[in-house]
Structure formats: structure tokens, C-alpha cells
Image: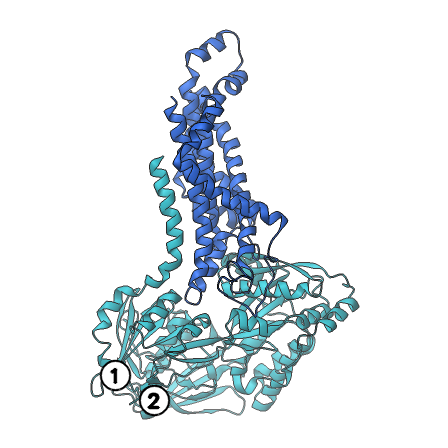
Amino acid sequence: MMQKRILSLALALTLLVAAFAGCTGSGTGSQSSTASTSQTSTDSGKETLVRMNIGSEPDSLDPWQSAASDTEAIMHNVFEGLVLYDETGAIIPGIAESWDISQDGLTYTFHLREDVTFHNDQPLTSADVLYTYNNLAGMGGEKAVSSKFENVESFEAPDEYTFVVKLKEPSAGFLSLNIIAILPEGYEDQATAPVGTGPFKFVEYTPSQRVVLEKNENYYNKDRMAQVDRVEFYIMTDSAAVVSALQSGTLDIASIDADDASVLESQFDIYNSPQNMVQIFAMNNSVAPFDDVRVRQAVNYAIDKDQIINTVFGGYATKLYTNFSPVMGVYYNDQLEDSYDTDLEKAKELLKEAGYENGFEFTITAPANYQAHIDTAQIIKQQLEQIGVTATIETIEWAAWLEDVYSNAQYQTTIVGLTGKLDPDAVLGRFKTDYPKNFFKFSDDEYDQLITSALTEQDEQTRIDDYKRCQEILTQQAAAAFISDPNLVVASRKDLKGYTFYPVTFHDMTKLYYEG
Amino acid sequence: MRVSTIFKKCLGNRNFILGSSMVGLMVLLMVVGFFYMPYDPDAMDTEHTLEFFSSQHLLGTDQFGRDVLSRIMEGTRVSFLVGALTVVFGLLVGGAIGSLAGYYGGKVDEVIMKLIDTQMAFPGVLLALMLIAVFGNSIQNLILALGVMSIPRFARISRSGFIKYRDAEFIKAARSRGAGDGRIIFLHILPNIVPELIVTSSLGFAGAVMSEAGLSYLGLGIQPPTPSFGKMLSEAQGEILKAGWYVLVPALAITLLVMGFNLIGDALQEVTEHGR
């Protein structure tokens, strides 16, 4: 029994200590080994080094095996596709210096640069591109690596530096698929020693510690040449550990929780930008009372998004009005801003019209592993009480959420973040009636038509207008309450400049440089 | 030993005094909470978040500007409810099957104890996680899971008590006078193992409070916005760099409850064992 008491006491203390444990969590093991190099990073003439964090273990270094966006965020420095994207999400030349699209939209002819070499000094030719694409699409007896190339009829490499793709149907989203990495033909060791064409070369990966890259001196594009010599990404899963690593000088730049920005803003430069995510309060459009558009609108009027942004995200989030983040530049419909400004009277009126004068009760099913969404649920519960609507919060495991809510739409309301894509079709297509994971159960004929026609539309302006109209429909129909796009927040040493955000997760190391 | 003498000895025991004042403080907070709370524990005031102790908010405010003291007061209800129901569940079910195993022995004993051993092989938290994953995330299922977790503890204690007494002279005497099994179990043996069961209950209570805190720290069981110490601890952890004091409040509450019950259990054990 004495032992048991000691055990219990120890456990009680452990809980207490657990709260502090984050400060000494993962990453400490590797910090000591780099402490000696930290001084050298600012000395000009010597090797310049940037140390950054990543939030999870790379799932695989081989781009054909990897699916995690964190891995993509760092390995996109090593690998490149025929095309690249810039800060606004626009497609720019990469390995292909130009391309032609036939009148019928079915044939894409890429003209490759002639000065590209892989990191193993092998020159890149159309044979490598053909090899890559055959594998991606599963042509020539290979198993398809990606499901995105099902629309492809054939690939050809008529000469060393030309690559031709023929599609089965015109697809406006096809060009953006070509950001996918080009790999050297016949090279088998991508999973252990990745070889690409990017501005950085892979050096080493120590599991659960770090990934190291170094400058590719032979990079073909002088404008995208790396400005630092070496980059080290430390794998750190705990946000408190990241903050203390920054403060102790073992990281130069780091992605941080919005919550921690206020602690760091005096010593570091804080950059933030919308991350192209839609944090959504989804109401199941097929179940009462949310099958009534007036009820959904009332909920929209009752929710004060600013309060959520300030409390949950410490102000580092961008208010949304439709299922689209402003970071998506040209496709974003900015005419919708200020729709559903908080108006409790209007909300009550709409509820009355819908026959819910005395309010109603419902459940918010929130994924238990996302504290931000649970916190948002608590605030929404509080806000809806003001119009007489009572919410009960139920947290469920992520796997159960995926099953019940995402796949089977067995829920009343939920809160989740929809990850952004470069292609507006992938973002707005989620609300199409026959989209398999349309868990909002939103259905609108005009919307479906617009989504379908925009996909094959060749005229860019018409396509943009279609997508803008789609966003308008979502807002008018109050398909959901679109809350915010939680910003990515990066804290950087004051002398380290140039961190750039992209509409998809990508830590572009070529833009970083030390001042002075 | 008579109850009054046990009680007297307890009062002379330092651990008992210390433990019961810790638990007493938490009970006081809970009882007062039924009649008066400084604020609505769920009312948010997003203009005043993470404020340090002040005369308006004796224990400060949390990340939503909710009054921490009021939330602690409501949180004690959850802890006591979970602790008490878990102990009752374990006592009834564990006590019953332990008695059967101990009293009848033989095959019955073997089968029951093998099952108990199998259950003990599962780590408690994993078992609770599994139950909650299967039956859903709610306070009922949490209590059920913790109750099931506490069965072996009670079963083993009552079994060993029954084994000790089932062949004692006074039981043989009762049996020869024609007393039935029921009478012997309830009137002759059970009263003799009450002290052990009380000690186990006290420790079981502490264990349940601890497990509940652990599970709600992981986001299981108690649903927000209902406060629970474990939940508050995990929320406070997120704010540790901005308001380090906040984490201490729920941690202290858990420590008081768990340590208090452990000390009481120990004191009772000492007192009852010395008597023999």
C-alpha cells in the first residue's frame, strides 16, 4: 500500500509536471550538436545556415510515396516540376521554359530548358520527364502513382527537350498538376537519398531529429538561386519547445502557433498570412432545422467571427465570407465581404419566420484532436445562446469524425478546417451535389452546372466569373457559416529576411537571406 | 474494533488530519458552489482573458475570460461525481464477484480470478479509450470505463478477506448452527472486511479522480464547456507561456484531491491494522 501511495503521488506530480514538460520536449537532443554552429551563421564569408522547425516527421523522402503536406513543404526545395507556382498561386515556368496548348485544349506541348541537371550531375532530358509521367499515370504497365492523371490519353517525347501530353477531355485544372516532381530515370534510391533538380540538394535525414539541405551551386535559374548555404529542418512536435528553441537561439526561423506570437513579438519579426484554409461551421443542409435556409442565415447573423478570431487565433486569422480564402487571388470574390455582419435582431427575425421563435437544440460534433475547433465551438455555443438556440458540444475522435461526419454525413453541425488547393475546382467542388464527400449536403442546380462547365471552360475570364458566382451562391444560400482562414504565423530572427508565404504549404528557402 | 475507537485513533493520526483537510477544502468549494458562485462558469468575457488573480476574479480568468474559481467550483462536482460513482460501481461489482470467488473457492474462484487477471493485463487508460471509442464520448461512458477499471482492485481485496475468514472457527460454528451461505456472507464475513474495503475505496476514489483528469486532459469524457480539472490543465498548458500561473490552479486542485484521499486511505489502514 505504501508503494501504491508513492505511485499515486508520483502520478499526481507527473500530471503537474506534464504541463511544463513541453519546454523540454522533442528536439533538445539535436540542439546541443548545433549550438556550436549557431555563431557562424551571421559571419559573412563563412557558410550561412538557416535552422527551421517542421511539425511532423517526413512520411517519406520519395515524392511518389509521400502524401504529407509538411514533407512537401520542405522537399519542394529539392524537387521541381515542369511548372512552378508563385506567391499568388499563379503558374510560372519551371523545368519547362514555355508551353503551348492546342485550340481544343487537349494537347499540351512543354518546351524543356536545356541547362537543367539533376543533383547527381545527370542532365535532364525529356526521357526523364516521360519516365516520371508514365509512372505517375500508370502508363506502360506501371502502377499509377497518382490518381490525378486519369484524364491523360498519352505522353510523348518527340525530341530531347520537348514533352507532349494529350488529354481525353479538356481540363482547365491540368496545368497546375504539373508542379509534380520530375525524377531522374532509373534512379532507385529516392527514399534514402532523394535526387531532384531544385535549388537545394538533399544532404541527410536523421529520423525524429532533422532534415538537412544545402545550396545547389549549379542551379539553372539565377533568379531563384539560394542565398543561404545550408538549411536544417528540425522535427519538433511541441509548440512550447519551438518557442524555447527560438528564444535560446537554436532556431533562426520557425512556424509557430498564433497563440505564441505575443510572447515572441518583441525579439522576433512575426510574419503571417492566410494559409488557404477554410475554417467552417458546417450545418447539415439535409436535416431539420438546418434544411431551412433562413435558419442557416440566422446562425450566420448570430456568429461574431471577430470574437472567434481574436480569442481562438489571437487575432492571427483572416475573416471569411464564403468557402474561399482571399489568398487565392484572381478567383476570390471580394464583393461578398461584409455579408452577414453580426446582427442579432435580424437573426431572431429569421428564426421567427422559419418557425423557431423559441429556438431549438442541436449538437456540434467537433473533432477532439483540434483544440482550435473545440474552442470555436465553445464560443459559437455562447453566441447562439443570445438568439435562444442551445448547442451541445460533442467531441469525437478524428477517425470517428472522418467516418461519421466526413464520409457518412451523420451529424447536425461540425467545425473543421478544409485545406486549400491551388485549383479552385478542388476547393468549390466540395459543395457539388454529387461530390462523394459533400458532407454539407448542399445542393443547388445552378451551382452544379457552374462547377461542371468551369472545369472544361477554356476562356479564363469566364472561368473566373463562374467560380465567383459559385462563391456568391454559397454565401446567399448560407451553405455553412464560413468563419476564418487561420493564418500561418512565422517568427524570424530580425536579421533574417525574406520569408515568403504561398497558397499551399511551402517553406521557400531560396527567398531567405541574412541582412548585413 | 469499534467504529468510535477507530475514529478516535484517526483524529490522532497526522496523515488523516492532513488528508481530510485537503479533501475538506475541496468539499467546501463544491458545497458552496451549489449555493453561490462568483460568476457563471461558462460565461465568456473575451475582453478580459488570462487575467491574473484580482479582487474581481480571485483565481484569475481563463483564455475565454471565464472565471477560474467558478470553474474550479463546478469542476469539483465532476471529480466527486466521477470518483463516487466509480467507487460505488467497483465496490458493488468487484466486491460481489470477489466474495463469490473467495467464499466458494475451487472452480468458481479459478474462473473468476483468471478473468480478473486478464482484465488487469489491460492498461486502464487503454481500456477506457477503447470503451469510449466504441460507445461514444460521454460522462456516462467515462464512469463506466473507470468503474470497470476499478473492479479488480475491489475483487481482489474482498476475495482475500473471504478466503481468510471462510474456514475460521466462528464461521464453522455458524455453519453448524445451520446458517445459510447468504447469512454467512453478509452477516458474518462482510462486517469483518469493511475496514479493508473502506481503505480500498479511499484509494480507489483518488485513482478515479486521477484517471478522470488524465482522460479529460486527452479530451475524452467530459464535454466542453463543462469544466473538469484535467481539461482545464490541458487548456492551461496551451497558454503556459502567456499565463504560467493558470496551469497551477487546476494542478493544485487535482493534487489536493488525489493526495488527500491517498493520505486518508493510508491513515485508515494504519489505524485498523494496529488494532489487530
Is residue A121 in view from this perspective?
A: yes
- Front residue of B167/A419: it is B167
Q: Residue at x 46, y 43 (%)?
A: B22
Q: Which chain is blue?
A: B
Q: Position of residue A280 (x, y in %)?
A: 58, 70
**How far apart, in angstroms, are the residues tagged by discs 2 and 1?**
22 Å
Quadrant of residue A306 within the rendered picture = bottom right
| Pointer 2 or 1: first along the chain | 1
Residue at point 61% right, 65% down? Answer: A380
Label 2: element kind: helix
Q: Nearer the viewer, residue A151 or B172?
A: B172
Residue position for label 2: A224
Q: Position of residue A318 (x, y in %)?
A: 54, 78
Residue B154 is drawn in which quadrant?
A: top left
Nearest the eye: B63 or A409: B63
Q: Is residue A514 left or right of residue B155?
A: left
Q: Residues within 10 Å of mark 2 (few under 14, many from 20)?
A: some
Amino acid type indicated by mark 2? Arg
Q: Nearer the viewer, mark 2 or mark 1?
A: 1
The letter of the cyan chain is A
The location of residue B87, given as percent across then percent down, is 50, 37
Task: Indicate whether A364 appears above or below B157.
Answer: below
Q: Which residue is mark 1?
A: A42
